[in-house]
Image (cartoon, rainbow, N blue to C red):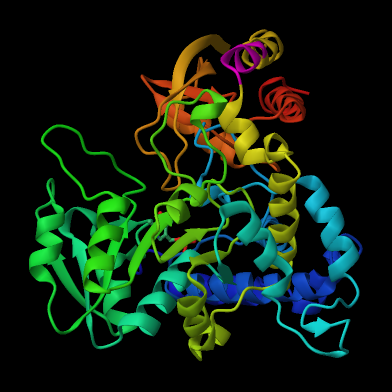
C-alpha cells in the first residue's frame, strides 16, 4: 500500500490540509470549542500520518470525519439504554435500576451538604454507616450491620479481618467466578487468607468440613453459586449444618449470599429456594455478605450482617476506609431499605420486574407489535419465552415472558442489533433463531413508545 501514492502527491495533500484555526471557525457556532479543538487535532494528526505513509489519497472527507469525532466526544459517554434483553439484573447494563423517588431524595441530600458523618445530637463526628445500620438490623434480625463499596469488598474485608494468614474451609463446589473479575480463590488470596478446599465439585458433606478443621482454621465459609445451577448427583452443606459445626468447634461461620434477597419469593408466588437475608441470619450464621445492587434493588454496595463482636472487628480494619461506601450509593440504599420496611417492596424496580405477571408483559408485547409490526420491511410477532433474573441471582429460575420477535427484510439479526445499538437511546435485545427478540419483561410502558419512535426514525424514510 505504502508505495502506491507518489511522493509528490503526498506533499501536495499535506499542503492542502487546512489550518486548524480555519476548521475551528467552521464548527464554532455548532459545538463547544474544547471538543472542536481536540477533534481537529486528532483527525488532522491521523490524516497527516496516513498521507505520509501513503495510505491516503484524498482529504475530501476531512470535515465529515472531524464532525463525527466532535459528536463522539461531546456527547455523554454514559447514557440511557433500553434493556430489552429480559435479563433483569444485567451487569453490563448497570445492574439494578433505581427507584425514581430515591433520586429525589438524593437531590435533597447531595446537591448541598448533609450530615453524612456528623452526629446532629452531639455536634461531633458521626459515622456514615449509622444511616442504614438500624434499618438493616430491623429487616434481617441481625445484631449489627456494616456497609462498604460492594460485595467483593465486603468479602475481602471479612476474610482479611477474620482469617489473615489462617485457613478458611470452603467447598470445591463453591469456588465460583462471578462476572469475570471476581473469583473466590483470588479474593481469598489477596485478603491473605489461606483457602482450604474440601469436598468435590458436585458433592460436599459436613464431614468434609469437619475433617479439614485444624489448629490453623479461622473460618468456615459458604458461597452462593449465584450464576450457575447444578442438578443430578449433587450434595451441599446447608447453612444450619455449617452453623452447628462452627458451634462445636468454636469457629465463626461466614456466608457470601451474593444477591441480597430481602423478600420471600415463595410468598410472592415465585418458586425459588433462595434464602432471604433474614433466613440467613435466622440460620445462626455469624456473618453474611451481600450486594446492594442485585436482588436487593438498590445502588452499588456491599452489606455485611451478623454478630456484633465480629462486625466491630471488620469495621476497625484499616481497609474499611479504602472500601467505604459513597454518599450517593448510601442515600439510595437508605431509601430502598425504607421501602422494604414500609411494605412498599413491590415498588422497587427489580422486584417489580421479577414479580410482573405474564399477562401484563404479554399486553405490552402486543402493544409494541401493533406499533412496529406495521412498519414496511419489518416482520414481527409476539412469542412466549423465558427471561432470566441474571447478574448472579436465582440461576435456577426461568420466568415466563413475552417477546416481540423482529426480522428486517434487508438486515441480518446482527446488523439489526447493531443499528439499534447505534441509536441515541440504544435498544439491547437478544438474538434467537435468526430473529431479534425484544423481551417486554424489562421494558417499561414509556420505553415501548421510545422503541416505536426509534423504529420509525430508522425504517420509515423521511
Ligand atoms: C455478585 C457476587 C459477588 C460480587 O459482588 P459485587 O457487589 O459485584 O462486588 C460476590 N459473591 C457472590 C456470591 C456474588 O453473587
Q: Is residue 390 above or below residue 102?
A: above
Which stretch did the figure color magenta? 357-363
Q: Provide the major secondary structure of the magenta segment.
A: helix
Instruction: Please name the residue shown 55% across and 11% down the image.
Output: 380
Q: Is residue 359 magenta?
A: yes
Q: Nearer the viewer, residue 372 or 30?
A: 372
State which quarter of the image contains the C terminus.
top right
- Direction from residue 229 to residue 56 in the image, left or right: right
Q: Quadrant of ligand 1?
A: bottom left
Q: Is residue 393 above or below residue 58?
A: above
Q: Is residue 35 magenta?
A: no
Q: Nearer the viewer, residue 127 or 399?
A: 127
State which quarter of the image contains the N terminus.
bottom left
Place of residue 284 in the rendered image (x, y in percent of width and height, measured from the top left): 40, 58
Instruction: Please name the residue shown 54% across and 77% down the image.
Output: 11
Place of residue 13 in the rendered image (x, y in percent of width and height, measured from the top left): 58, 70
Q: Nearer the viewer, residue 167 or 14?
A: 167
Q: Is residue 141 visible?
A: yes
Q: Is residue 411 above or below residue 312?
A: above
Outermost residue toward the front in this view: 248
- Direction from residue 426 to residue 401 in the image, left or right: left
Q: Nearer the viewer, residue 264 or 5?
A: 264
Place of residue 190 in the rendered image (x, y in percent of width and height, measured from the top left): 31, 81
Q: Is residue 19 above or below residue 393?
A: below
- Direction from residue 214 to residue 252 in the image, left or right: right
Instruction: Please name the residue shown 40% across and 84% down the image.
Output: 161
Place of residue 40 in the rendered image (x, y in percent of width and height, measured from the top left): 70, 72
Q: Is residue 63 visible?
A: no
Q: Quadrant of residue 242?
A: bottom left
Amino acid at each position: 500500500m505504502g508505495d502506491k501514492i507518489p511522493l509528490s502527491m503526498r506533499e501536495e495533500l499535506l499542503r492542502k490540509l487546512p489550518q486548524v484555526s480555519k476548521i475551528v471557525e467552521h464548527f464554532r457556532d455548532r459545538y463547544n470549542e474544547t471538543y472542536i479543538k481536540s477533534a481537529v487535532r486528532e483527525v488532522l494528526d491521523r490524516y497527516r500520518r496516513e498521507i505520509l505513509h501513503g495510505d491516503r489519497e484524498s482529504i475530501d472527507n476531512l470535515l465529515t470525519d472531524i464532525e463525527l469525532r466532535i459528536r463522539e466526544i461531546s456527547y455523554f459517554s454514559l447514557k440511557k439504554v433500553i434493556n430489552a434483553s429480559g435479563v433483569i439484573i444485567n451487569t453490563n447494563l448497570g445492574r439494578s435500576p433505581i427507584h425514581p423517588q430515591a433520586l429525589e431524595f438524593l437531590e435533597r441530600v447531595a446537591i448541598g451538604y448533609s450530615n453524612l458523618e456528623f452526629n446532629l445530637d452531639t455536634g461531633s463526628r458521626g459515622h456514615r454507616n449509622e444511616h442504614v445500620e438500624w434499618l438493616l438490623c430491623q429487616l434481617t434480625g441481625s445484631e449489627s450491620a456494616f456497609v462498604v463499596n460492594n460485595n467483593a469488598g465486603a468479602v475481602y474485608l471479612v476474610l482479611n479481618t477474620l482469617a489473615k494468614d489462617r485457613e478458611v474451609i470452603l467447598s470445591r463446589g463453591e469456588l465460583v467466578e462471578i462476572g469475570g473479575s471476581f473469583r473466590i480463590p483470588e479474593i481469598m488470596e489477596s485478603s491473605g487468607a489461606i483457602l482450604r478446599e474440601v469436598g468435590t465439585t458436585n458433592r460436599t458433606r459436613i464431614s468434609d468440613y469437619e475433617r479439614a478443621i485444624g489448629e490453623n482454621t479461622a473460618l468456615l465459609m459458604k458461597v452462593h453459586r449465584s450464576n450457575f445451577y447444578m442438578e443430578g448427583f449433587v450434595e451441599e452443606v446447608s447453612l444450619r449444618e455449617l452453623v452447628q459445626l462452627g458451634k462445636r468447634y468454636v469457629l465463626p461461620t461466614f456466608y457470601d449470599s451474593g444477591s441480597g434477597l430481602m423478600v420471600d419469593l415463595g410468598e410472592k408466588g415465585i418458586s425459588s429456594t433462595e434464602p432471604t437475608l433474614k433466613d440467613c441470619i435466622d440460620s445462626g450464621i455469624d456473618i453474611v455478605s451481600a450486594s446492594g445492587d442485585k436482588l436487593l434493588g438498590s445502588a452499588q454496595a456491599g452489606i455485611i450482617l451478623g454478630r456484633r463482636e465480629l462486625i466491630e472487628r471488620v469495621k476497625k480494619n484499616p481497609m474499611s476506609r479504602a472500601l467505604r461506601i459513597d454518599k450517593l450509593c448510601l442515600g439510595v440504599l437508605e431509601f430502598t431499605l425504607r421501602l422494604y420496611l414500609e411494605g412498599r417492596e413491590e415498588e422497587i424496580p427489580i422486584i417489580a420486574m421479577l414479580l410482573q405477571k405474564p399477562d401484563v408483559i404479554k399486553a405490552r408485547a402486543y402493544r409494541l407489535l401493533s406499533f412496529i409490526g406495521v412498519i414496511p420491511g419489518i416482520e414481527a410477532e409476539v412469542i412466549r419465552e423465558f427471561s432470566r433474573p441474571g447478574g448472579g441471582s436465582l440461576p435456577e429460575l426461568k420466568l415466563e415472558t413475552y417477546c416481540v420477535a423482529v426480522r428486517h427484510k434487508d438486515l441480518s439479526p446482527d446488523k439489526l442489533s447493531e443499528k439499534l445499538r447505534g441509536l441515541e437511546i440504544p435498544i439491547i435485545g437478544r438474538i434467537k433463531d435468526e430473529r431479534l427478540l425484544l423481551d417486554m419483561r424489562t421494558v417499561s410502558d414509556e420505553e415501548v413508545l421510545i422503541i416505536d419512535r426509534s423504529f420509525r426514525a430508522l425504517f420509515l424514510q423521511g
